[in-house]
Image (tube, grey):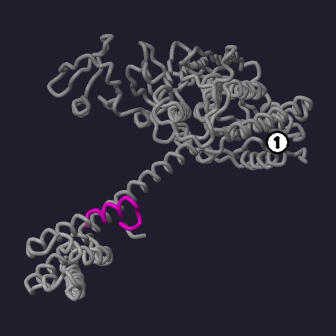
Amino acid sequence: MHPILGSAPRRNLYLASWAVIGSLGAVAWSTANPDAGIAVALAVVVPPCLVQAFVCLSARYPCRAAPLEAKSLGRTLAMHAGAGMVAATVWAAVWTGWTGVLAGLPGFGDAARLTPAQLAAVATAGVLLFWLSSLVHYLLAAFEQSRRAEARELGLQVLAREAELKALRAQIDPHFLFNGLQSISALTAADPAGARRMCLRLADFFRSSVRLGAEDEIRLEDEMAMVRAYLDIERVRYGPRLQSEVVLEPGCGACRVPPLVLQPLVENAVRHGIRPLVDGGVVEVKACCDQAAVRVRIRNPFDMEAAAQAGTGVGLANVERRLAARFGREAVMRRRRGDGWFEVDLRFPRIENARAAGEPFRGGGR
Amino acid sequence: MTSPARRRIRAVVVDDEELSRVLVREYADPHDDIEIVAECANGFDAVRAVNDLEPDLVFLDVQMPKLDGFEVLELIGPDVAVIFVTAHDEHALRAFEVHAVDYLLKPFGPERFAEALDEARGRLARPRPTPVSRVVAAARPAGAYLRRILIRTGARVDVVPVGSVDYIRARDDYVGVVAGGRERLKQQTLTELEGRLDPARFVRIHRSYLLKVDRLTRLGPATRDTYVAVLADGTELPVSRRGYARLNELL
């Protein structure tokens, strides 16, 4: 598509500029021929100007053939000199022809004929106009290019963000499955009914994790149900060492959360809190809300003497990033460590309506 | 399945999950030559049981309360055959560096278990002790300094957090770890232990002394060439000329 003809506003602006050029030409011509009226001047000047308006559109081709980034300045200049000559020659010919026709008409006479000096001036103006048009074409090309680069940059940003979100997408630790299967294997002989119960629990848990994990966000009560299911399964492994207290304040169940944001925190609490303790302890998960915000606290005991294990921070940081991606700066995550206990507090805006599909990302909060 | 002529193998099962111990016991049941003499749910109990019962074989989980599987291995020494049992495959390399007999990934079946047992029988028939230093080195996760020093005296295990150590001194074949005014002996050389501690916190001030730098309160001259380091509790330690240079470099 031609950069000027292709868009209506640019086309109109271009034609308006040529109307101005034509009028100026007519004024110049009537100054040189004071005897002739302004109507005659317009009749002489405007038609060649119209022709030149279209000729100048062809400046696009030399501009494309010699882009500004090209290394050879000489070649670029030669290209434009040549193109300008051709354009000027065409224009001079059009003028000569047109004034010749006009001179034969009644009411114009010899005044319409161009003197050699006038013809030279016309040719010069033709070259300059063509070069001006080239300049405009270069500007337009540069503008287009920067716009394309911007769009590309924006596209890349969106892609990167999507990739990051995909990477952050909640995933269940595969070892959870392996350990669950080990428990089933052990129960098969000793407690077949228990083995079957464990199979069904694992199946239920994985089915909901796949279903809910595919959503952008889910209801808090669904997330809490996942947490309960997770703890039930882990209790089969750990026995009485693992106790839990999961409380969801009435009226908060419909608040929206990204799927599986609490589950990794509870997993951490079990793995790094309960497991290193010989006698285990209680994992507490408490969620409440007010008009504006949802608060969740996950608390677990932990062994002060046990060496901090690697990998504790990764799960937490992941949850923090997912909350930030969804709620922006309004999501807050705080960890606190006391004498034998560890606590993670989450606070994020209360939103109860599902986000419409395809609604753009909300970067900085609500 | 097993010939009566075969020697009996006494085994200890170490896993903090009861169901896992149940499973190992169940899989071992058909093998007449295997006798499970103890089950332990944490690292301390494991060290005690190995010390008291002197088993031939240990089924060892990696992640456990108190001491992890590699720390248990460091404390029980290389004379016992070890089969690791865990759901995590990322420890396998370290396990084979300490010449573990086998590495069972949960969940595993009775056939795989029998293979591991065969391997253990072979190993026990022709013992191939692992150098202690290799076991010790493997007990440390790659690139990390010790966070606690494990000291075993008979069946008793002391865990000394590195932060509580004042200084460590060489005593013949042992090192004396002094923490809070109490000294505990550990069978290791000072140089070996020094290599596992953070050099930004511990300085070898003397051939026989490794000082935790934050315990130093002042440095005084002793003779023309040597100095004496005075600790917060008034203890004076000799500082050699090279030790003085090292201290200066760090401070």
**10 Å crowding of disc 1: few (<14), some (14-19), many (20+):** few
Classified by dominant secondary structure, the portion drawn in magenta counts as: helix
- Provide the secondary structure element on which disc 1 rests: loop
Residue B40 visible here: no
| A8 falls in the magenta region | yes
Task: Work out whether B199 lies above or below B157.
Answer: below
Give the residue drawn at x 19%, y 77%.
Answer: A126
Location of residue B61 by image quarter:
top right
Q: Nearer the viewer, residue A350 or B126?
A: A350
Q: Which amino acid, mark 1?
A: Arg
Residue A292, percent across and down? 54, 18
Q: Which residues are magenta?
A: A4-18
Residue A325 visible here: yes
Q: Nearer the viewer, residue B145 or A18?
A: A18
Give the residue drawn at x 91%, y 48%.
Answer: B1
Residue A74, percent across and down? 18, 80
Q: Where does label 1 land, which residue?
A: B7
Residue B89, percent across and down? 65, 45
Task: Work out whether A318 lies above or below A295.
Answer: below
Residue A270, percent across and down? 65, 25
